[in-house]
């Protein structure tokens, strides 16, 4: 796809302009310099034809000193791979030596450059862009990313300068790619795993906690399958989030779980499962997302996993700590060495295949009858939870991985305890494991007794949504289902 890179020094409004062009709040916008570190990519659809926009880190003074070299390398890559560059400057701050240096660098490239003077928010600012004419770029476009002023003219200029798209471009996109969110606490190797999958230094990797700040969406094709990898910021406990930028980063990471088709929960194999790992796993369960657990840094525990007994012990301990994610398969790998990526994607495709499996109405109801007869639920306020009928409807929508949904018609859903719900799910998985998939259990209550009688003749009608007959005759509480 045709690509536009946004470059400039820190705090000139590159991320604000990026968000305005793609019409989503993707990049974090904050007064603190050096917030953006990785290349953030999204599609702008405001013009005649869509084009890809790349947000980059700030260049020059005020940038994050710990990552200056790596950010500069990311900017170089963006400039090499783009078709057009948007050079953004701050109209209110005026022309700076850093702006002039960036301009000299851009003039040496063969790519077209548009000079964008940002923060022209008021009529009193209309004369400010004239100062930047000395940089030698024509035209000079005045915009306000914050107030969406001048952005439509900017999009029109971009449309005119970009090369025409290839006729086959849209066909190559195929169907909707599977969105895989790579989540975990800081420094477990999420960005290293992303780079190992891509076989490229696509995201910044550092021993500094909190290196990744934005949720970075990266298209990836493996064979015939298309994916969207989402490298996220590490999720720390609320009490340890030291600054506003980190709070925004964690919010983006949590939102990435919500919009993902599948989550890869990355665990540090050397440290094992921590309380924060469990909390992040709880977010995945609460969002009802398919999951694969990645036990990273396997090279650091080779002495433990050198034989089958040691490997089994490591996996058993992990499954015990994350027993609420018992349905998620575990992959032991090392992002540092780049080995076993095939094993990871084999697990991912197994989850996709499992989503196509269905359990028949007959087997499901026989299973429920047996389970609830042998182990009836406890009484609650003198009443017992009963299932009249169960079925699995067809999946809704067109999601890459639809999670299995089961509908149980019951007497009173308030009588079902969480422990008994888990018991029923366990029995269902004994017949259909649904590897990597949560079970979405829906309860529908039967109509109140007497609601089926009409007023005139007293004859029974069949109201919409009325449950079928019970699975067994009602002779005793023990025999009821």
Image (spheres, rainbow, N blue to C red):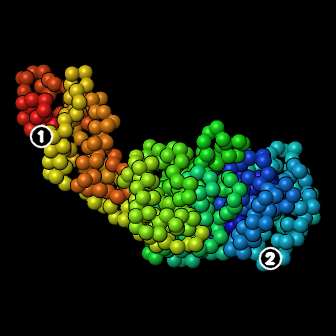
Where is 96 relative to 344, above or below? above
Distance of label 2 from label 1 (alpha carbons) = 75 Å
Q: Which label is found at residue 471?
A: 1
Residue at (34, 46) in percent of width and height: 440
Residue toward you, 7 or 476: 476
The quarter in which the C terminus is drawn is top left
**Which numbered disc, 2 or 1, marks the residue that appears first in the sequence?**
2
Q: Given contact means CB atoms under 8 Å apart, are the residues at marks 2 and 1 in contact?
A: no
Examine the rendered structure and indicate whether residue 446 appears above or below residue 20.
Answer: above
Res. 61 image quadrant: bottom right
For residue 55, say whether it is visible.
no
Q: Secondary structure at mark 1?
A: loop
As rendered, which of 12 and 294 lies closer to the eye?
A: 294
Give 47 or 24, whichever is nearer the viewer.
24
**Above or below, comparing residue 250 to residue 480 in the picture:** below
Mark 1 packing: few (<14 Cα in 10 Å), some, or many (20+)?
A: some
The image quadrant that residue 463 belongs to is: top left
Using residue 189 as the reference point, say whether residue 309 is left or right of it: left
Residue under the image location 71 percent in, 48 percent down: 29
The residue identified by callout 2 is: 109
The spot of residue 229 in percent (x, y) is: 54, 63
Rendered residue at 80%/62% (across/down)? 68
Q: Position of residue 257 (x, y in %)?
A: 51, 50
Tell me the tag on residue 454: none
Q: Position of residue 301 (x, y in %)?
A: 53, 64
Quadrant where the N terminus sits is bottom right
Report the residue at 20% width, 29% height from top.
Answer: 384
């Amino acid at each position: 796809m045709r690509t536009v890179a946004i470059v400039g020094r820190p705090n000139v409004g590159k991320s604000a302009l990026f968000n305005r062009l793609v019409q989503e709040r993707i990049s974090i916008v904050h007064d603190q310099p050096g917030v953006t570190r990785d290349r953030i990519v999204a599609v702008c659809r405001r013009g005649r034809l869509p084009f890809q926009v790349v947000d980059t880190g700030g260049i020059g003074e005020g940038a994050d000193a710990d990552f200056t070299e790596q950010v500069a390398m990311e900017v170089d890559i963006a400039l090499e791979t783009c078709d057009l560059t948007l050079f953004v400057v701050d109209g209110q701050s005026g022309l700076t030596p850093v702006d002039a240096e960036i301009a000299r660098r851009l003039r040496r490239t063969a790519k077209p450059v548009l000079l964008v003077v940002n923060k022209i928010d008021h009529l009193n600012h209309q004369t400010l862009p004239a100062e930047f004419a000395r940089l030698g770029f024509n035209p000079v476009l005045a915009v306000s990313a914050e107030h969406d002023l001048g952005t439509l003219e900017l999009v029109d200029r971009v449309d005119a300068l970009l090369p025409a798209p290839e006729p086959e471009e849209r066909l190559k996109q195929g169907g909707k790619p599977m969105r895989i969110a790579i989540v975990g606490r800081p420094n477990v190797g999420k960005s290293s795993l992303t780079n190992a999958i891509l076989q490229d230094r696509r995201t910044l990797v550092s021993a500094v906690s909190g290196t990744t700040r934005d949720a970075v969406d990266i298209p990836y094709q493996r064979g015939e399958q298309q994916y969207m990898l989402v490298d996220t910021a590490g999720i720390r406990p609320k009490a340890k989030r030291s600054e506003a930028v980190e709070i925004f980063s964690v919010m983006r990471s949590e939102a990435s779980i919500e919009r993902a088709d599948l989550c890869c929960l990355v665990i540090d194999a050397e440290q094992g499962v921590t309380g924060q790992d469990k909390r992040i796993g709880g977010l995945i369960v609460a969002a009802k997302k398919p999951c694969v657990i990645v036990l990273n840094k396997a090279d650091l525990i080779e002495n433990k996993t050198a034989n089958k007994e040691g490997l089994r012990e490591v996996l058993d301990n992990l499954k015990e700590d994350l027993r609420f994610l018992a349905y998620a398969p575990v992959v032991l790998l090392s992002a540092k060495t780049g080995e076993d990526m095939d094993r990871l994607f084999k697990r991912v495709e197994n989850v996709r295949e499992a989503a196509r499996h269905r359990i028949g109405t007959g087997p499901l109801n026989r299973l429920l009858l047996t389970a609830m007869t042998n182990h009836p639920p406890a009484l609650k306020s003198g009443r017992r939870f009963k299932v009249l009928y169960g079925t699995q409807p067809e999946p809704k929508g067109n999601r890459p991985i639809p999670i299995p949904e089961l509908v149980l018609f019951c007497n009173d859903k308030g009588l079902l305890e969480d422990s008994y719900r888990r018991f029923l799910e366990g029995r269902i998985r004994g017949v259909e494991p649904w590897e990597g998939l949560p079970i979405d259990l829906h309860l529908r209550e039967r109509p109140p007794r007497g609601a089926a009688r009409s007023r005139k003749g007293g004859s029974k009608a069949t109201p919409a949504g009325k449950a079928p007959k019970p699975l067994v005759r009602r002779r005793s509480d023990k025999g009821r289902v």
